[in-house]
Image (cartoon, grey):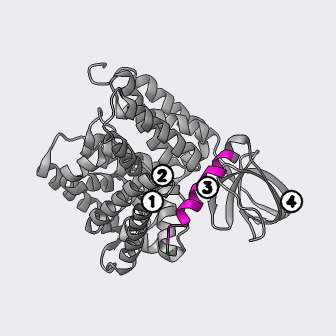
Amino acid sequence: MSKFLPKGFLLVLLFSLFGIFYALLNKPQKGNLYSTLTLNGKVIKTVYNRALVLTSNNTLFWVYLNRYQPRVFVGDTILVEGRAKGFKIFARHLEVKRNFFQRLRVKIHLFLKRRFLKTATTKGSKKIGSALIFGENFFSKKEKKLISRLGIYHILVISGMHYALFLTFFLWIPLRWKLRYYLALVFFLFFTFLVLFPSAPAYRAFVSVALFLLAAIVERPYNSLKAWLIALGVWSFIYPYWVFSLGFWLSYLASLALIIYYGRNKTPEEDFIKNFFSKFLGLEAALAVGLVIYPLLTTFLGYVSLGSFLYGVLFTFLAQLYILVSTFNLLTLWSFDIPSRVQDFLGNLFVELVYKLPKEGITVEVGKTPLWEAVLLSLLGLGILLLPLKGWKKISLLAGALSLEIILLKVF
């Protein structure tokens, strides 16, 4: 069996499966109370004036805050007094508790955010920057719908593509003695844990890139599939509630599709720009990812957007430019006028295109797919990706398989 599987694969596989099993045993329950209460819990998600809180007895509540109460961040522990109505709690009094690490993270995040906001001239540019640099989603419901219809929502979630560009930035630095690998690793540690707040896609990408860099430093072989399994196991143990999030599985399945696409000995994040321009402008990768994640997306959205193929290249290229310029600005604290203006221009252009590009006819309404059917189609998609084809033959197969998949979703 060692002839076909990398060394240590079975051990890593068991570790990841045990992590998933642990998460399933710790599934959080949805709160349902109707009374005045005092609640203590950890913030695991924020949306404008709402915070999703996980209590010590593994119960979830949405806490609604007013404008006069302190802002909360993912990772905060809060003590809230208010009126509960089922799954919702309307806060009357709020106390925020932060340990040393969380206080440091909030201070660094807010400091960098203020530096960025001074250079952003419009609300749209501020929202794009908040998403692409700081992992924050401040888009309105209308904007989220527009972005989803265009099929580019994944571009605005910090994940593998963003880490790919950060990594490419450091791989281009002409330094000797592996110094660029050390610099990149320090940057990724800082960015992931002191700029961003906990996020499944970003933390998955961090493990992949960090293990790749460590392998390069110690001159040992790297296996992206093992890195994928390690990330799956580690974060399932630390954040078991992530396993019950659709975004968690979309991120991991998209990454798995790219691992099959690029090969096990390369991280999907490695030299992303080179792969983008040498692999039919990312078309093959987009088809591979779409084949795997579209069924699961339809369980939530009820439609398939073809915008990933019609507009994906344009928005991906814009996002790449934006992130590369932003990396320089982040490292220099937005101290240089011209790069800051370029970043603002790209952000405004991104927003203009979201509103101006035609959206009629680019979505296929398929209805909400049953979960079992979506899982089956996703697994079949992964099986197709394993077929040993290359070039246009593989693109033709992926395009045909994806078209058939959409027809099946539409009919059944």
Tag 3 residue: 111
Label 1 residue SS = loop
Say which residue appears at 52% left-offset and 47% top-offset.
Answer: 200
Label whose residue precedes the other's in the sequence (2 or 4): 4
The Cα–Cα distance between marks 1 and 3, rounded to whole angstroms, is 17 Å
Q: Is residue 408 visible?
A: no
Contact (Cβ within 8 Å) of mark 2 with mark 1: yes
> Hey, which quadrant is residue 182 in on the image?
top left
Tag 2 residue: 332
The stretch of residues the image draws in magenta is 104-120
Label whose residue precedes the other's in the sequence (4 or 1): 4
The Cα–Cα distance between marks 4 and 3, rounded to whole angstroms, is 35 Å
Label 2 residue SS = loop
* Residue 122 percent coordinates (x, y): 50, 75
- In magenta stretch: residue 215: no
Asked whether, in this view, residue 7 is left or right of residue 16, the answer is left
Say which residue appears at 14% left-offset and 44% top-offset.
Answer: 390
Asked whether, in this view, residue 262 is left or right of residue 280, the answer is right
Residue 261, above or below 119: above
